[in-house]
Image: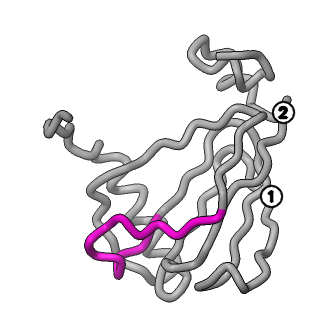
Amino acid sequence: VSTHCEPMPAHLTSMCSELCGRVGATVTAESAIVNYYVPTQTMGGHVDDAELDRSRPLVSISLGCAAVFLCGGPTKAISPQAIWLRSGDVCIFAGPARAYVHGVPRILPDTCPPDLAEVHAWPAARGGSG
């Protein structure tokens, strides 16, 4: 396991701070996770709880294919609301919503923006394998 980490790109840190400010939250982004989905993949309902300080907002920026995003409440007993996410959409989990169960039950094929689908590293965005 490598302990080397590159610094968070300044433009992403700035963008996250600005987006959070628009909803009255404050954050200085220090890390990022990229979830890459192909149309056949999903992400089950979960809570992002690996961070030591869960009082800070979580910013999710969607890139690539459109997806159905489910957001519930603090437990799986709360029925989730379905939200249609497209490339470029942003979700901010702050305050109590930071601990809400959420997931991605469906990625919609043939919805990837052409400039992203043409990238050779993303052949699955066009419904292929890769």
Please state, as top left, top right, bottom left or bottom right, where the N terminus lies in the image.
Answer: top left
Check disc 2 and report the residue beneath it.
Answer: 109
Q: Earlier in the sequence, mark 1 or mark 2?
A: 1
**Majority secondary structure in the magenta region:** loop
Label 1 with label 2: CB-CB less than 8 Å: no
Q: Report which quarter residue 2 is drawn in.
A: top left
Which of 79 and 55 lies nearest the eye of the viewer?
79
| Magenta span | 45-58
Residue at the spot 48% in from the left edge and 42% down from the top edge: 34
What secondary structure is found at the residue carrying circle 1? strand
Establish if 77 lies above or below 119: below
Disc 1 crowd, CA 10 A, few/some/many (<14, 14-19, 20+): few
Residue sitting at x 47%, y 86%: 95
Q: How is the image coloured?
A: one colour
Q: Position of residue 109 (x, y in %)?
A: 84, 33
Q: Residue furthest top?
A: 120
Q: Position of residue 130 (x, y in %)?
A: 64, 16
Q: Would you say residue 52 sits in the magenta stretch?
A: yes
Establish if 86 lies above or below 100: above
- Going by the image, does 113 lie left or right of 120? right
* Residue identified by numbered label 1: 84
Residue reaching furthest to the left: 3
* Three-letter amino acid code of the residue under disc 1: Trp
Q: Amino acid at mark 2?
A: Pro
**Residue 32 drawn in magenta:** no
Displayed quadrant of residue 68: bottom right
Q: Position of residue 116 (x, y in %)?
A: 65, 25
Q: Nearer the viewer, mark 1 or mark 2?
A: 2
